[in-house]
Amino acid sequence: MAELIPVPFKVLATRLFRELAQKKAAFDLPVARFFQGATVDLSRTVHGQRASSPFGPAAGPHTQLAQNIVLSWLVGGRVIELKTVQIKDDLVIPRPCIDMQTVGFNVEWSQELTLEQSLEEYVKASMLIDMLKASGWAPSYADTVFDMSVGYDLAGIRSARVCSFMAGLMDATPIVARLREQIPPSLTHLRDTPFVTRISDTVTLSTFHGCPPQEIEAIAAFLLQEVGLHVVVKLNPTLLGRAQVTEILHERLGYRELNVPAAAFDKDATWEQVTGFVDRLGTLAHSLGRGFGVKFSNTLLVDNHKSFFPASEKVMYLSGPPLHVLAMLLVRRFRQIFGDRLPISFSGGIDAGNFADAVALGLQPVSVCSDMLKSGAYSGYARGARYLVNLVKRMNASGAADIDQFVIKAYGHAQTALDSLALLAQRAQACRAALEQGGDLRATAGEAFDAWVSAARLLNTETYADRMLSDPRYAAADNATPPKKMGTRLTLFDCMTCDKCIPVCPNDANFVLATPKGQLPIERLMRNGAGWRIETMGVITHDKPWQIGVFADACNECGNCDVFCPEDGAPYLSKPLFFGSVAAWAQTPTRDGFAYEKVGDGLRIHARLKGRVVSLETEGSKVRYRGNGFDLRLDPVDPAGSAEGLCDGPVDLAPLRIMELIRSAVTAPDAVNYISAALLATTSI
């Protein structure tokens, strides 16, 4: 299994700011795709903290590594739901684990790093964001909330290691101090940045399907009372009940191939049990002066009817459009019981077309996962900025200066909501006039404004739920076509160079290598009496102006690049694979790939090609080329005329030619990638 290896902080910082300066990009995301801010107020208050937008990445592949979190922030995410951690941090995750061919399925549900690594990744991300702020990025749009996520049972969450993880995010002072010293010399001016040390004081509780309701309540109470966190409990779509879930999926939406195992309903908490503990926890949180809310929704457990995942996986987790419908129906049902008493965060099938609708219901934050794994006119993280751009357009069209006023105006329920408040005639008339004349509703309504917003949220929820049920965009027919495959197969070099694999990778593992068009000779060097001779056996043609590389440390073989690549073979399996350390390369003997290390003033490249291990070391005008049965020094321009050293027989020079081509691309003066950044940061990689 591919193991994620966190990129050292100094390498991340070097790459981020060098790429911004040289390429006008960050971790392969062009500056033009950043969210550039808005003329309206998009801010929300999340458990007493200001977030500059209601958007953020959901706990998942976009919030596991530091670079992922930074990318989410650059596209406007200001409520970052960190990937869920648990005491069992040595899980073996099946590969591939993400299937976005149509709606969205996955078989990965927890962090792939250790608890200690996860803590450091989240602190690294916060520090990089602080460094971006200090460098002038998003000057009026910078307020960010980090929301930790823990699971999955009380024993695990009470354990010393999970408690240490939570404490580390509540006070990251020692980690910040250690990482501050790792800021590279090129960024010395940022070492005095006033880094946030209280990274998070909010948590979203994630529980397994089948977690007993009394256990969920006990965990939330522990987090509120003993840990001292604001708490959100993530709830399951099975709360709708077997009959309604089946009717929605099969009859209403047409996903007849989806089957929810009976055990998912039999073991999950019932609606009555959930509303009971939610009511009690809300009262407890209020007595403690802490925030409490719910999140809709968790993914939905379904039988694995496809062949994408390993055969060992009998079930998988559903996301995307059908989950959106189920989760929104839960929002409506919840509000029919609790009104607008408790805050609701939302994740489930959000995209650029419905993000503003969710915001208009007063849901916050509105988080995204599946859609940011897709390709299109805007791909991957770049889709994030579109959510906010579309929200701003909707707000401007309604004449709303902030989100609460947008909630009042969004669905045409402003007057009905106002009438439900039974205000004094003079105040009601002033509010109606402000509505008609485009006045400031907040100032006009005064202390009645919050009640007006709450009434509109409830009316909007009913309207949106009804519209959604008849919207074909959520039906199976509109989500049945997978990305097109062309029938060709990937090789080490050259492909269609569509670059789709780069933005759809949540970890930024895929990158471009600029190479000249040409041919690499396939040669053998052999003894010729006292000298040497070359035998040419063919050529390797590389006709494209750039190649695709894969950074192994950030690639967990999730499979998403394979889904959107128009060729067969999977970029993560077929393209040049670069390891962040010689140790990682050596520990992965079943995969071909490359590792670089500095040796004095030179560079040594370790390679495994078709299972054969060779190395190449630069030594002035010559290179040292070694492998099983040979150790040579030669000038690559004239191997036969310059070779000296030992060999047991003919020496294949094709690996040398491949390493030379790749070395020149990876280390070119204008190259920006994890390998070149590590070399610049004088880090042994």
Image (tube, rainbow, N blue to C red):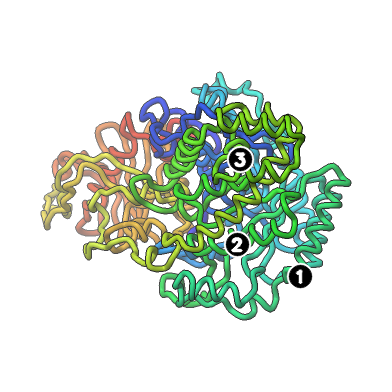
Say which label, 2 or 1, has the lower sequence index.
1
Give SS at disc 3: helix
**Which residue lies at the image location 55% right of the left edge and 44% below the top edge?**
412
Query: Pointer 1: what residue?
Result: 212
- Disc 1 residue type (three-letter): Pro
Is 5 above or below relative to 299?
above
Say which label, 1 or 3, has the lower sequence index.
1
Judging depth in this view, the residue of 77 and 475 nearest the camera is 475
Is 233 above or below relative to 23?
below
The number of callouts visible is 3
In the displayed image of the protein, which residue is found farthest to the top? 189
**Which residue lies at the image location 29% right of the left edge and 31% below the top edge?**
620
Determine the CA span between mark 2 and mark 3: 21 Å
Query: Pointer 3: what residue?
Result: 408
**Which residue lies at the image location 22% right of the left edge and 55% below the top edge?**
651
- Residue 452 placed where, x, y %? 69, 40
Is 201 above or below relative to 567?
above
- Disc 3 residue type (three-letter): Ile
- Residue 155 in view here: no
Q: Which label number is shown at residue 458?
A: none
Query: Pointer 2: what residue?
Result: 329
Give SS at disc 2: helix
